[in-house]
Image (cartoon, helix red, strand yellow):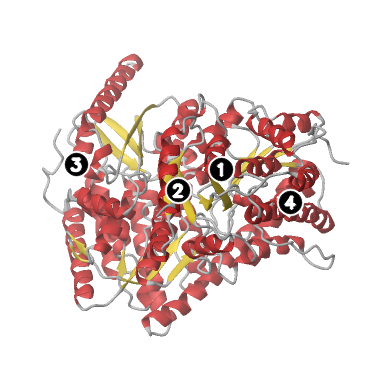
Amino acid sequence: MSTQTADTEGPVGRGASEGARLFREWYRSLDAVAQRGDGAAYVFVMGSLAELLRVFDLPTVFPEVNSLQTAVRRVAHEYLNEAEDYGYSPDICGYVKADVALQLRGGSHPMGQIPKPALAVLTNACNTYIKWAEIWERMYQTPVFTLDVPGSRASGRQTWPGDPDFERDREYVARQLKDLISLCEKVSGKPFDIDRLRETLGHTNAMNRGWKRVLEINRSVPAPFNAVTDATISLGVANGFRGTLEGATYFSQLVEEMEYKAARGIGTIQDEKHRLIFVGVPCYPIFRRFNEMFSEWGGAFVVSTYLWFASGGASLGYEYDLERPLESLAEGVLISVRHAMDCMFFQEQALLESIDDYHIDGVVYHAIKSCRTVSTGLADNRRALMAARDVASLFVESDMMDKRVVSEAQLKNRVDAFFEGLASRRQTAGV
Amino acid sequence: MVTRTLDVPVAGRLEDLTHFARDLLDDTDFPTVRRWRDAGGKVVGHFQVYFPEELAHAAGLLPVKIRGAQLEARQAEARFGSYLCSILKSSLELALSGRIELDMFVTHPICDAARNLAAVWGRNFPYSCQILYLPQNADSPHAASYLQGEYVRLQHDLEEIAGRAVTAADVARSIGVFNENRRLLRQLYAVKRDRPWLVSVSEAYVLMAIGGIVPREEHNDLLQRALELIEQRDAKPQDRMRVVFEGGFCEQPPTDLLHMIGQFTYVVDDDLLIGMRWLLDDVPTDADTDPWMNLAVAYLECSSYSPVQHDLRKPKERMLLDRIRGADAQAAIISAAKMCEPGLDEQVAYAKALEADGIPYFVTEFEEGMTSFDHLQIQLETFVENVLFA
């Protein structure tokens, strides 16, 4: 089953090509920073605070993105081996190890030179962020700022503005942000400018609006984009260009493209037979091949939880109130990062709703060795989902970085059996 | 009036008491918790590492430390993937198999795996299952006030379970009980450090660990008696290497493994069940102070260290070096539970710091279900000989 690219008129394909161009441009700009000997702000996808860091003209490096790029470019094993030789265990996060090796190599990366960290800003959305930043602290004495964002205490127990528990959490985040502003002023030597913050928040608003809309458009049958492959490019833009005009423009054009495709029935694959949800982190070592195992059977990934949490909760479409930028930033960070965490720990209700809204035939759980944050609860989540809804599901394990634990043949066997089961279900149901 | 759950033998020797504690600790049917429930009591299970047990105690609930067990995780295995530490699976198995019955379960964001437990547990049991978000930026000036609020929120949830209101005086009284417990544990560790021939690492461990499954008043009585018996022990110092054991902050090494280590070293300090000794000094109980704030401040400002707490003021490798020097140890055993990401991450930093300081160290991994230690014993003996006869 080939990927749909037949209709090249209009905006079709623009999101992919423009996203790739922006991506290359971003890495070129980071290479230039490194060549000048300047540092960058190291941040993570769940709560990057890019809107704030841009006010101080701090270039942002996403170590997670650097690491996954080594896997996509099939050199991850070289980086992993180097970090393991340094002393890191085979049983820890592969992203961390690839970054350790990158640092040991002086920033050398397939996409260009990566600047050293002048500052690290992280949230507690993933515990490994915290352990990771401690490594830069030790290597370079990098100033590290951990923005502590209290997540949902239990499933269905989210609180909202006006609730005393929410206000307490918001106040906590707001106070920390003020401290972060002081640290940014110190590191960058530039004063805080609230009007520039308004500007970057405005761009993020446009991006969040666009991201949410793009994800909604995939309710169309056939699905205009593949939520695992096509959307990963857009996800890169959502993170790397957060708070910028380029990012805002990209997403408004992406909405246009997807609406165009939806209106004309242009799907991501030519003959969409099975609409699927992907739960987890992609298998980057065999990124395209992994998807082909499904598309060959007419399976299209229509929804991916990765697009929810790895966009830092942007999928929620939170929009900042530009009349009260600092207060709104605190509220938005709390709600969005909390949403990202919910999409990893408490995602069962959202999955059930997606099954209905996106006309889903099957749910694919992809647990990976490298990431316990995302993977620990997946098997139990699957069990609960199957108890709640009669939907086909598949549970497979591999990794996002380490090809030593990716067994393509074993995966294919499982995927084939899954589709045979789906076909049999259809037959039984008389569809 | 505290429900009695322990039937402590009239101990004439320390061995009687440690055997009793060991049997109780190994009993995966948790008889003390059953007795508490049989008497009408309610139980709050809290996962490792630190939990403000005083809050549950003040509500008349039994706080039980969920720390895994040596058992086959038949039902829990189906609820988890492959690449996880054992304690997660065995802890859930205890509940799924009905060996331990809870009225509430609390986990903490100590690691990426453990924070998932509230969701997993919540999907499997009807009672309240939640995450207590202890601050992850312990050096922030705003962490204490946030944590105080979080403790008050938790207190309300505990009140609901208990069906009764809790006053500041109730919490202060409970803090007093736990202050006494921590004082006794400090005494036990002082003996281990200063006269390690009087109490081995495995003996001290079982005496401490049962505190997690019995009312703390009973544990205080038992520790008091144990300390008296330790003083009466007729044991002579031996020519053994003094070591610090690091890596027991969450999943627990088998007691037999500790026993093996204690056969030819003196473990003069460790981080085993560090949550029970997390607060380093008495927490104030003055009537005119806020006990929830007192507990919050103690957690942040007067506490130990572990790989699962990030505090810029407490770089872990420096803290380890302080622990080694404070205990006058000659070497360190740098251990981590299998698949324990924080522990494995920290091993690298520890090893580099120890190398830089010229302190010999032995790196290893363990799993709570291990039953054979022959290979490890040979490696450790070789390490000790190399250091002692270098």
Q: Secondary structure at mark 3?
A: helix
Q: Secondary structure at mark 2?
A: helix
Q: Mark 4 belongs to which subunit?
A: B
Q: Of label 2 and label 1, which has the lower sequence position?
A: 1
Q: Is residue B378 left or right of residue A74?
A: right
* CA distance for labels 2 and 4: 44 Å
User: Do discs 3 and 4 share a chain?
Assistant: no
Identified by mark 3, the residue type is Arg
Q: Of label 1 and label 4, which has the lower sequence position?
A: 4
Identified by mark 2, the residue type is Val
Q: Nearer the viewer, mark 2 or mark 1?
A: 2
Nearer-the-camera pick, A180 or A135 = A135
Q: Nearer the viewer, mark 2 or mark 4?
A: 2
- Asked if the residue at tag 4 contacts the one at tag 3, i.e. Cβ–Cβ closer than 8 Å, the answer is no
Q: Which mark is residue A288?
A: 3
Residue A172 position within the rendered picture, expressed as x and y whole percent measured from the top left: 58, 66
Q: Is residue A282 left or right of residue A185?
A: left
Say few, some or many: other residues with alpha carbon within 10 Å of mark 2 (under 14 / 14 to 19 / 20 or more). many
User: Do discs 2 and 3 share a chain?
Assistant: no
Say few, some or many: other residues with alpha carbon within 10 Å of mark 1 (under 14 / 14 to 19 / 20 or more). many
Identified by mark 4, the residue type is Leu
